[in-house]
Every structure is written in structure tokens, then in C-alpha cells.
Image (cartoon, grey):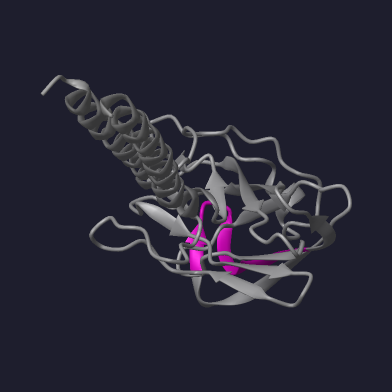
Amino acid sequence: MPFIRHARTGRAARRAVTVLAAAATAVAAGLALPALAHVTVNPGTAEQGGFTKVAFRVPNERDDASTVKVEVSFPTDHPLAFVSVKPVPGWSVKVTEAKLPTPVKTEYGELTEAVSKVVWSGGSIGKGEFQEFEVSMGRLPEGVDQLVFPTKQTYSKGEVVDWSEAPKADGGEPERPAPVLRLTPAAGDATAAPASPAASSGGATGAPEVAPVAGASSAPADGTARLLGGAGLAVGVIGVVVAVLALRRRPS
């Protein structure tokens, strides 16, 4: 009964194609999603010695809880003299300053205190949602290639996710990466004009500064590579299945 045999073979092959395609899709998604779900700073680059405006982008990763608090720590080894925040509807913000272990000399005088932490609370980021918290800051240090902002994300059920791991030396991504702002040398000798020191001398509680935004999107290159790799794997698996089906249909 050659017809029956070929019909059964065709049905089995179609089932195999479906299963393998689903598996390949799952692998691609598994490779891409972890790199896209953590807290990031956007844009991801800025010029050394200038001012910039960034947004801390916080996605909600839980199906059964909302994000209700975001705590961002600012670097004290390279303190920022001026930091201001943009109000977020439905959220309250608290800016904390701390004394520096060693005063830092700036063009505006000696800096003895700097913003050490900014906390947003009272709002809610639900399932499948994200929120951006904007901050204007400067001057960015010179001779430094990055600033790391450890962040704690608190969920409505009490879970706290600590995004505090610095980038790996080999360029790989840690399990709980902290938001990182890459700093690039300034183009030429021109630097961005700072806001009035008097408007920012009280910390970050005043109205948000209007500062030039430097750099481009911070979508991690590692996440893009994972996404492309997963998609290539899916296409490769489907191609193998199609080739096997073609060989089976050839007359013996």
C-alpha cells in the first residue's frame, strides 16, 4: 500500500515540522528576552565633560505583581554636581544627597556633597508595561569610560530585584546587570553649556533642566546578537526539516 505509507509519512513529517519550528521559536525567544527585560539607561551614551538627559527605563517582569518602587544609586567615586528630575504623574520622588569622602574641586567651587540616590515610589507599573524616569545631570566626568547606576526594583508582593552587577571584563552580560551610561570623548573642544548653578545648587528637587541629549539608543548590542542568533537557529532547523521531506518524496 504505497499511498497509505506515503500519507502516513507526510503526516508525521508535518508534525515534525510543527514541533521543530515551535522549538526553534522558543529557543530564539529565550535567547532574546532576558537581555531586553532588565533596567536600562537611555540613551546609553553621552559625552564626557558635558550635560545630558537620560531616562531610566524600568519594565515589569512579573505576571502576578506590579512594580511599585524604583531606587537608583548614583556614583560617588565620580560625583555629579548637578542632578534634577522630571516629575512622573502618579509617582513621588525623593532625592538623597550624601557627603563625599573627599571634596571634589569643580569650576563652580569645591563639591562636598552630591546626589547619592533617587527613589521613585507610589506609582505602579503593571504586567506587560514599562515606565521611564527622566533625569538631567552633569557635568559628566572626563577620562572615565562609563558610569554605573545600581538599581533596586520593588514589586507589590515585596520582592526586590537588585540590578547592581557591573559589566563583565570579557564584555559578557551578568545575570543582574546595572544600568550603564557609556561616556565618549567630547567632539572637538566644544562642551555643552551648563544650567545655572544657582538653579541646581540645592540638589535635584527643583524644576528639570533642559540639557542636550547625547548619544544614541542603548539597546544592548549583546541582546541584538542573541536575537539574531536565535532567529538564525530557527531558520536553520526549519531548513533541515524541509530538506529531509524533499529526500523522502524522491522516488526510490
Magenta stretch contains residue 105:
yes
Q: Residue furthest left?
A: 252
Q: Main secondary structure of the magenta part?
A: strand
Q: Nearer the viewer, residue 53 or 18?
A: 18
151 horizontally vs 225: left or right = right
Q: Nearer the viewer, residue 178 or 148?
A: 178
Quadrant in the picture for residue 151: bottom right
Q: Nearer the viewer, residue 65 or 149?
A: 65
Residue at the (40%, 47%) spot, across then down? 23
Q: Residue furthest front?
A: 1
* The N terminus lies in quadrant: top left
Residue at the (68%, 76%) spot, across then down? 159
Residue at the (43%, 66%) spot, across then down? 175
Magenta stretch contains residue 106:
yes
Q: Position of residue 112 (x, y in %)?
A: 59, 71
* The C terminus lies in quadrant: top left
| Residue 123 can be seen, yes or no | yes
Quadrant in the picture for residue 155: bottom right
144 over 24 or under it: above or below = below
Q: Nearer the viewer, residue 248 or 212?
A: 248
Q: Position of residue 230 (x, y in %)?
A: 35, 42
Magenta segment range?
104-120
131 horizontally vs 108: left or right = right
